[in-house]
Amino acid sequence: MSLPEAISGLRSIVGNDAVLDRPEDLMLYEYDAGVRKSTPGAVVFPQNAQHVSQIMMLASAAGIPVVARGAGTGLSSGAISHAGGIVVAFARMNRILEIDVENLRAVVQPGVVNLQLSEYVSHLGFYYAPDPSSQKACTIGGNVAENSGGPHTLLHGVTVNHVTGVEVVLPSGEIVKFGGKAAESHGYDLTGFFVGSEGTIGIATAITVKLLRKPEAVATLLAIFESVDDAARTVADITAEGITPAALEMLDGWTLRQVEAYCHAGYPLDAGAVLLIELEGLREAVEEEAVAAGKVCLLQKAREVRRARDEEERALLWKGRKTAFAALGRVSPSYYTQDGVVPRSKIPAVLQHIGDVAKKHDLIIGNVFHAGDGNLHPLILFDDRDAAQFERVMAASSSILQYCIDVGGSITGEHGVGLEKRDAMPLLFTEEDLAIMTDLRNAFNGDEVLNPGKMLPAPRMCREITGRSRNAILAQEGL
């Protein structure tokens, strides 16, 4: 079946107004928030699981690759199509299907925007905990695909900890259900397996998530430091004291100045770094932990610890953190966001390495990240119209990820592997590990109709990369 014939078939499934194939329309779907581009052959907007099932049957029969897409806020090029493939966009599957207060569950379609669910249940005293910084735009379906995190996952966990069931369309078009409303399910944990599979196993068409009761009290602290090193060392010291904040975020001085110029959050312009610390729970416990956390910061050379006086001031501090990426768009044509994870105790060393890499490659790298769980987000600024700059950015990124692995970390904490970090997988996993992952994917998606070329490298690439020693990689970088 040719692509034009497939497009005609798509229109017969969803209607003429739910299929895009004009070049000027397809340009809007050739990229996500990563740095790669690929133009699809068509974009289709299903409205229910039956539509998705029929789309997959058509695509599988035609051998045309398919990628599911939420809001396109992903940072690993995981939602861009294989050239000439079909993008299944979920903008029209955006309904909250059920709120089950008695069982603390909600059932939503994949196109529901993350923040909208919390807003929808707020009057009932509940919220949905995973809160990516893009939560005003990103969709829960995309969060499930990438196993997204966010600032408050230090206490509450990432998306997989809040999804109890998924309705999934397989490449064959079969509709299956993994899990449900129960806290635990018997047999294999297929829900846990599906979350974070980056659209390579199936397409979620309904998602059952946990609802949490709003905490009785919240305290938000801003700890101000003269240096990045002092702030970084404080992160491990807070948790060593037995304090587990709901969120523990860090911004370096350069980044916070860009943020402050953008949204006037109240960050001090002369600081070397700040920690944004949030505690939640029972009122008495929150008060005790706020005092204890403040003392730790002051012992570790914080020059000041401020506490948000009211909800308005708290919201402003968080606005600064959650719009940090957007703020950097004012000072650079492009930026490349990395997503390495390291043990908390290694944060100072990794930040020093990032600084060395920036100097070596003559780049500006800002740091704003989930310090509490060691999930780094170095933002490498560059001009994407300059091919030489792009090559320096890729080299800097590779060096940062390799260093994260060397100190006992990982190449991703919440942004996924996608296309951006696919070829780095052999640096973290053995060829045998990757072969098992490939077998698991092939059990569901053997023909690679769904999101081909993402997440798992080809076997040849595995052998090439694992054959290179760490010293060879660092020598290439001159480090």
Image: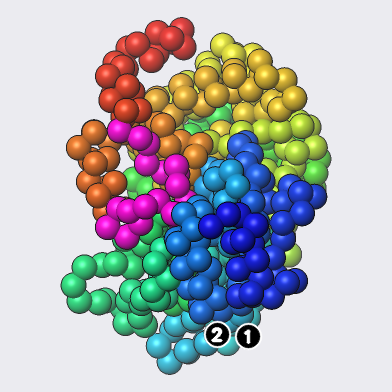
Is residue 370 at all visible to an observer of this figure? no
Q: Is residue 423 left or right of residue 255?
A: left
The residue sitting at 75% across, 71% down in the picture is 17
Q: Residues within 10 Å of mark 2 (few under 14, many from 20)?
A: few
Q: Is residue 25 left or right of residue 459?
A: right
Comparing 165 with 201, the one in front is 201
x, y percent for residue 359: 59, 13
Measure the alpha-carbon separation of dots 2 and 1: 17 Å
Q: Is residue 376 left or right of residue 112?
A: left
Q: Quadrant of residue 75?
A: top right
Say if 443 sits above or below 214 in the image: above
The magenta-colored residue range is 442-459
Q: Earlier in the sequence, mark 2 or mark 1?
A: 2
Kind of residue at badge 1: His
In the picture, the disc for residue 123 is 1
x, y percent for residue 113: 62, 68
Q: Is residue 354 left or right of residue 342?
A: right
Which element type, helix, strand or loop, lies under badge 1?
helix
Comparing 49 with 372, the one in front is 49
Q: Quadrant of the C terminus?
A: top left
Mark 2–mark 1 CB contact (< 8 Å): no
Name the main secondary structure of what is drawn in magenta. Answer: loop
In the picture, the disc for residue 97 is 2
Q: Quadrant of residue 333?
A: top right
The residue sitting at 29% across, 67% down in the picture is 190
Of the two numbered discs 2 and 1 in the rendering, the one whose residue sits closer to the viewer:
2
Kind of residue at badge 2: Leu
Comparing 288 with 180, the one in front is 180
The residue sitting at 32% across, 28% down in the picture is 460
